[in-house]
Amino acid sequence: MAFSKTFPKNVPGSNYPVWEEVFLTPEEELDVEEESRKNNFRLLDDSLREAKALAIKHSLNTEENITRLAIALFEKRASHVVFWKESKAKEKFEEKNK
């Protein structure tokens, strides 16, 4: 099932927008998912390094504390695949309605 997102499109002379649904192609979805995976891998790697530094700085340097800090940092920073798909759909919508 293709990913889709609905956006409001202003219609001249009307107070109400027309809602337009934008679909991503399977290729666009795969591209977005791959980019998201790469970003999440980098974010997790950064989070692990920074968690270790924080744990050492605050004398919390056990594996459990480092892991918990890394997860908290990652969850705070990580973007979900749906967000990126929605961003791609909005990009297509805006490009189509220039």
Image: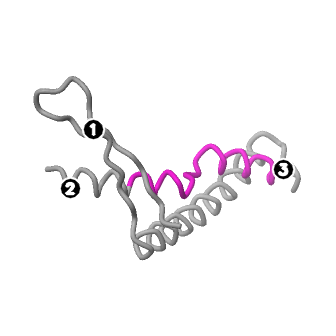
Farthest residue to the left: give it. 13
Farthest residue to the bottom: give it. 27
What separation in Å lies between label 2 and label 1 (alpha carbons)?
17 Å
Residue 63 x, y percent position in the rendering: 87, 56
Residue 60 x, y percent position in the rendering: 84, 44
When asked about the image quadrant of residue 40, the answer is bottom right
In the shown orientation, is residue 7 left or right of residue 70? Answer: left
What separation in Å lies between label 3 and label 2 (alpha carbons)?
49 Å
The amino acid sitting under disc 2 is Glu
In the shown orientation, is residue 48 left or right of residue 25? Answer: right
* Numbered label attached to residue 61: 3
Element under label 1? strand
**Which residue matches tag 2?**
95
* Numbered label attached to residue 18: 1
Element under label 3? loop
Residue drawn where x is 58% and y is 47% of the image: 77
Colour logic? one colour
The residue carrying pointer 3 sits among few (fewer than 14), some (14 to 19) or many (20 or more) residues within 10 Å by Cα, namely: some
- In the rendered view, would you say 88 is above or below 27? above
What separation in Å lies between label 3 and label 1 (alpha carbons)?
55 Å
Residue 6 x, y percent position in the rendering: 39, 46
Residue drawn where x is 75% and y is 46% of the image: 69
> In this view of the protein, which residue sits in the foreground, 21 or 37?
21
